[in-house]
Image: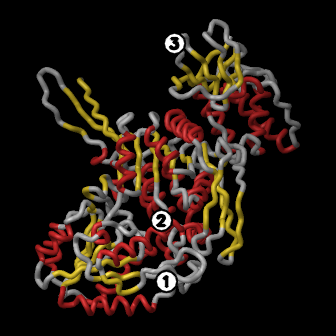
Amino acid sequence: MVTFYGSSLLDASVPAGQELAIKGASRPGLVTKNGLVVFGNDGKMVLVRNLQFEDGKMIPASKYFSADETTALELTEEEKKMAEDIRAIWKGILSNVAVIEDSTDFFKSGASSMHVVRMLEEIKQKYSGLQLQNEDVYMATKFADFIQMAVRKFRGEDKEEELVIDYVSKNVNNMTVNMPYQCFINGQFINADDGKTYDTINPADGSVIASVSSASLADVDKAVAAAKEAFENGEWGRMNAICDSCTDLMEEHQEELATIESIDSGAVYTLALKTHVGMSVQTFRYFAGWCDKIQASEYGATIPINQARPNHNLTFTKKEPIGVCAIVIPWNYPLMMLAWKSAACLAAGNTLVLKPAQVTPLTALKFAELSAKAGFPKGVINILPGSGGLVGQHLSEHKDVRKVGFTGSTPTGKQIMKSAATNLKKISLELGGKSPLIIFSDCELDRAVKMGMGAVYFNKGENCIAAGRLFVEESIHDEFVRKVVEEIKKMKIGDPLDRSTDHGPQNHKAHLEKLLQYCETGVKEGATLVYGGRQVRRPGFFMEPTVFTDVEDHMYIAQEESFGPVMVISKFKNGDVDGVLQRANNTEYGLASGVFTKDISKALYISEKLEAGTVFINTYNKTDVAAPFGGFKQSGFGKDLGEEALHEYLRTKAITVEY
């Protein structure tokens, strides 16, 4: 006779396990790593956590076949003394028992659940290094079994197996960086199910950094199943401490993370350290602070409703996590995009499967390592490098994924919307942009030049909110262009790990080729190529910072995003505020925008009229973890960062009580 404890319906694919014959069942049960799976006559599955036998002994169901295989420990003198101290504690509780024998059963001798708490607290007072839980007593009710269990915990033998990581190690940037390269699924680094790999390339010289596992459809299913199990049945509740711990580890490893980011994405190291990694740390720190505040007044409200006497009703709302979330991120800010979405997702209590961009997977896999070391339970975070068309598509279609967060191109965002319709999953999309920057003659010109260059060339132009088109008032146009070219000539193009470098390589070869074609198109259409437009003559994927003028509204380069270091400048007539506004808004994109003027009334008027999710006034690229970020029109919907980002990963439940 066996009693089941901790049972729950298992709504997933049949897991792998060892068959166990059960009399009267429709088919044999399965002893799996998570417990015993029992099949009902209707084909549905129940997962059983613990088993108790007729003699009162309880074991984890996953240990059924190995329950009697554990060899008894030989106790040291110190451990023998601990055993006698515990025997005395048992005797103090079980006062009706003359002698505490090895065979004495705690509960059969009259102890209750209250006595369990007392016994564990007394042990903790004597041996603070021995951390026992209530469940441990139920698993080892006889004194001899309890001592064996306690000694194993005291020695640390019960700890989860150490995380095994195969690294690619490189001596670079005056340090050794250790980079995981396998899929991270259910707390383990493993090869792709079909064994496929691909090379990730250093854009500074075209060399291979690592051969990375390329996740398959089977890996997606495994990762989603692990995330679902962790959400529904796991220990996912120690959120705040874990987020802070993970943030501390990221801060501790910031130089290594920035170095990996630099060699994998081409980011200038100083920018990678300050922005790619620095803002990632800030983002996790910010959302860690939200973990215990989600049920604050604005997140869970009491609502007066109409009452038909004599009935009395109370309605209140509750904010709940959604479940398994799929996050798909781009290659321009690999770690920061991970942080912007994952931090809010995890703070809300969800689990996630994240697909980094195929060309920049390494900081995401390093983050997986740090998250495991921080104590995130298995299955809460899963990282799948590989193809967007395969992995990203399957995630957006998967029936067990309840939310997709995506940053990338508008065409891909539209495809995700179609795929998400399979189970009406919630989605948030941060898509393409062609952000206008309007520069009036009454601006501080030198500041406008400096900020305007940053608006275009920041992160080699691989920036979703980059100013895609500058509108410069006629009276200052020529001087503005002259000053920009002067400053470009001072920029140092070179090794992104060199601290004096201003401008690093484009992210990957195909993107460089696309940018060169973009510039050729601009010249063919009649725009004036003032500077650049060519590949730099050196190894790697370097492109000259580029300036186009005389750009007319109908031209391809006026309509489409370059996502590179290409400044596209158009004149507007002096004083034509409404005219330039109309031209600035004449695009299907609406991610960001900017205006430079000393006239605050004009600036606020412009900010009200610009159709964009973010407006910068006399500055640019100034994002903050507390400020919501997201676009309008075909730049997508939903918000990253700030309080609003939490709403993307929560659902509202209304509860009405009649009393």
On the image, the x and y values in percent for residue 146 come to: 74, 30
Viewer can see residue 350: no
Determine the secondary structure under disc 3.
loop
Which residue is pictured at 45% across the width and 75% down the height?
A: 460
Gap between marks 2 and 1, in whole Å? 17 Å
Q: Quadrant of the C terminus?
A: top left
Name which of mark 3 and mark 2 comes first in the sequence: 3
* Along the viewing direction, whichever of 78 and 471 lies nearer the viewer: 471
Residue matched to label 1: 502
Mark 1: few, some, or many residues within 10 Å (few <14, many ≥20)? many
Which residue is pictured at 67% across the width and 61% down the height?
A: 210
Residue matched to label 3: 42
Mark 2: few, some, or many residues within 10 Å (few <14, many ≥20)? many
For residue 462, side relative to residue 81 (left or right): left
Q: In this rendering, is residue 48 above or below 198?
A: above
Determine the secondary structure under disc 2.
loop
On the image, the x and y values in percent for residue 393 come to: 46, 44
Task: Identify which amino acid the numbered label 2 is placed on.
Answer: Tyr
Q: In this rendering, is residue 590 above or below 302?
A: below
Mark 3: few, some, or many residues within 10 Å (few <14, many ≥20)? few
Task: Identify which amino acid the numbered label 1 is placed on.
Answer: Asp
Q: Are marks 1 and 3 in contact (CB under 8 Å)?
A: no
On the image, the x and y values in percent for residue 59 come to: 69, 25
Task: Identify which amino acid the numbered label 3 is placed on.
Answer: Asp
Determine the secondary structure under disc 1.
loop
Which residue is pictured at 55% across the width and 60% down the height?
A: 359
Query: Which disc number belongs to residue 333?
Result: 2
Q: Quadrant of the N terminus?
A: top right
* Along the viewing direction, whichever of 149 and 626 lies nearer the viewer: 626
